Amino acid sequence: MNRLYHVPLSPFCRKVRLVLAEKKIEVELVEERYWEQDPDFLRRNPAGKVPVLRMDGMTMAESQPICEYLEDVAPEPALLPKGAKERYEVRRLCSWFDDKFHHEVTANLLYERVNKKITKQGYPESKNVKAGARAIKYHLDYMTWLLDQRRWLAGDHMTLADFAAAAHISSLDYISDVDWNRSANVKDWYAKIKSRPAFRGLLADQVPGFPPSQQYADLDF
Amino acid sequence: MNRLYHVPLSPFCRKVRLVLAEKKIEVELVEERYWEQDPDFLRRNPAGKVPVLRMDGMTMAESQPICEYLEDVAPEPALLPKGAKERYEVRRLCSWFDDKFHHEVTANLLYERVNKKITKQGYPESKNVKAGARAIKYHLDYMTWLLDQRRWLAGDHMTLADFAAAAHISSLDYISDVDWNRSANVKDWYAKIKSRPAFRGLLADQVPGFPPSQQYADLDF
């Protein structure tokens, strides 16, 4: 049986969970308290991070290489387009969300508010939370601009870029940090992706001590 | 004419330069003082980072998506293997160097010592420099372990993973931060990749105020 070591609100784990579910690859989820640096876990991934996927006799780390692998071994439904330019755009947006959005938004909001408490690293730094709250506005506006020209973030088809973005957005929505009144087309985009069967597992997540926001699992939010 | 906006010691720019040169794609290099946030440059890349590659009518950012694009449009010589597992291993190591090595080593050594001065952000923080000097030892040991089992970092053929690693290592060698006595097989690996024609452009780099280390351009270091 395939096994994914993860934590529920990690956007990188969520990206991999979404891709596995979309491609109908069954996997057993195992919560991993990676910050405790358990020697068994470090043997599985010397980088000490989640997600870690055990599949096909391999123990894989790093969400983007894992997703590329899944695309290679399970090409249907395709989450990367055929054309080189279109593939570039998907990968660029994955980097955008996993690097820039992660650094400017997710780290400042989710990690300050949730991860710090769970890993017992103190209280949220209000200057970081404020920076994250400012940055998410610009990012939602950037997504609005993309979605003014395209049906999905990277083009007219749903791709890995949509799952990368939805992974971050869904974690932030869990803690009520997405202003759904800011952009009608971002809300429409999220409603479309949120209603996919692949999303169900994420919407059932419950983190002890952090109840989800009211609209988190609501498909008509 | 293709054009690459870059800074000479950026490992991400170096990775793209190496891949372009290896694939014999001609490109005009333009140094970009990205930290000055010139509006023209920000129009080219809203993320405000280098490398930015103008090619095939596109303006591309993010080194890994750029390298994947180059592999798609110029598959020879191949820098990604054919098998899914082998491709995963290449991509995992690219992430390892561009994320973990970058964060633990390059940022603590190169950015503290060089970038801070060039961008007028103050003096090196000695605690960071010490952390970087400690971390590079573990990373060199990890590379030694990989190279004990393989001819190149990701397997028995040279791949993008070797260029990702060599991009970081070469920038650190420029400022004398690589201890070449630590591992004979890392030194052999670097000697092989450094002697490739694709490396020549990098070895000719000169950063004003920072003369290269004595062995930097020496193929018999």
Image (tube, coloured by chain):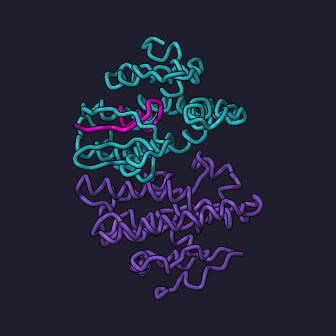
Chain colours: A cyan, B purple
Q: Is residue B111 left or right of residue A214?
A: right
- The quadrant in which residue A198 appears is top left
**B117 vs B206, nearest the viewer:** B117
Q: Is residue B68 left or right of residue B118?
A: left
Residue displayed at 33% across by 46% down: A68
Q: In the rendered view, would you say B94 is above or below B26?
A: above
Residue displayed at 27% across by 33% down: A27
Q: In the rendered view, would you say A70 is above or below B72?
A: above
Residue B158 picture location, percent across and down:
33, 69
Q: Would residue A106 be seen by someone viewing this image from the given angle?
A: no
Q: Is residue A8 left or right of residue A131?
A: left
**A5 vs B163, nearest the viewer:** A5
Q: In the rendered view, would you say A47 is above or below A139?
A: below
Q: Would residue B132 be seen by someone viewing this image from the given angle?
A: yes
- The quadrant in which residue A1 appears is top left
**Residue B80: within the magenta?**
no
Q: Which residues are magenta?
A: A1-17
Residue A144 picture location, percent across and down:
54, 28
Residue displayed at 44% across by 34% down: A7
Residue A48 picture location, percent across and down:
45, 48
